[in-house]
């Protein structure tokens, strides 16, 4: 079952990929609209005490929200046009983003918090590899 699910010809794999790659759109939209709440509730990041520092952190949160919504939008385009290879590449790139986000999370929130992001890495990479044909086709 697993080999057929991850096959490059699996009919459900693109839908699974799109569902997974929709997560950044949700987090990104939340970060764009409610950056202070996103910092506290999603990322467990403290808000700096100084007003000028708060403005920078809130702006950076919104910038990352824009990044996340762009990532999901690119994936939506690949999914909608049926470009399985591009969707696979985007899944692999999303795995890389998850690695970096986990490192950043651990740098602020401490060891162990990186797993808020790192649990996604093997899932994103596996789906991406399947879409790119690394596991072969079902016979």
Image (cartoon, grey):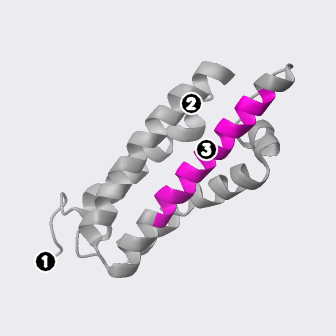
Compare residues 90 and 119 and report the one nearer the observer: 90
SS at circle 3: helix
Residue 67: say if magenta.
yes
Could you tell me which residue is drawn at 36 percent across and 48 percent down? 93
Mark number displayed over residue 74: none
Could you tell me which residue is drawn at 77 percent across and 23 percent down? 53
Could you tell me which residue is drawn at 29 percent across and 56 percent down? 89
Q: Earlier in the sequence, mark 1 or mark 2?
A: 2
Q: Is the residue marked by circle 2 packed among few (<14), some (14-19), or many (20+) residues within 10 Å?
A: many
In this rendering, position of residue 19 left or right of residue 75? right
Q: Which residue is mark 2?
A: 114
Name the spot of residue 48 as percent of width and height, x first.
81, 22
Q: Earlier in the sequence, mark 3 or mark 2?
A: 3
Q: Residue 4, can we see it?
A: no
Q: Which residue is mark 3?
A: 63
Q: Which residue is mark 1?
A: 139
Name the spot of residue 130 as percent of width and height, x first.
27, 61
Name the spot of residue 8 as percent of width and height, x first.
23, 69
Residue 9: say if magenta.
no
Q: Are marks 1 and 2 in contact (CB under 8 Å)?
A: no
In this rendering, position of residue 30 left or right of residue 116? right
SS at circle 1: loop
Could you tell me which residue is drawn at 45 percent across and 71 percent down? 76
Q: Which residues are magenta?
A: 54-73
Q: Residue 124, can we see it?
A: yes
Quadrant of the rendered image containing residue 10: bottom left
Q: Main secondary structure of the magenta part?
A: helix
How far apart, in angstroms, are the residues tagged by discs 1 and 3?
A: 45 Å
Q: Is residue 73 above or below residue 71?
A: below
Q: Is residue 64 above or below residue 15?
A: above
How far apart, in angstroms, are the residues tagged by discs 3 and 2?
A: 20 Å
């Amino acid at each position: 079952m697993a080999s057929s699910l991850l096959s490059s010809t699996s009919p459900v794999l693109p839908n699974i990929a799109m569902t997974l790659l929709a997560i950044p759109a949700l987090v990104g939209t939340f970060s764009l609209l409610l950056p202070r709440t996103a910092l506290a509730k999603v990322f467990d990041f403290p808000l700096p005490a100084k007003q000028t520092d708060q403005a920078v952190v809130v702006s950076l949160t919104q910038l990352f929200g824009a990044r996340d919504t762009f990532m999901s939008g690119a994936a939506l385009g690949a999914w909608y046009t049926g470009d399985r290879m591009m969707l696979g590449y985007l899944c692999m790139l999303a795995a890389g983003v998850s690695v970096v986000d986990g490192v950043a999370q651990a740098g602020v929130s401490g060891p162990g918090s990186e797993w808020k992001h790192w649990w996604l890495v093997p899932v994103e990479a596996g789906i991406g590899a399947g879409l790119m044909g690394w596991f072969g086709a079902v016979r």
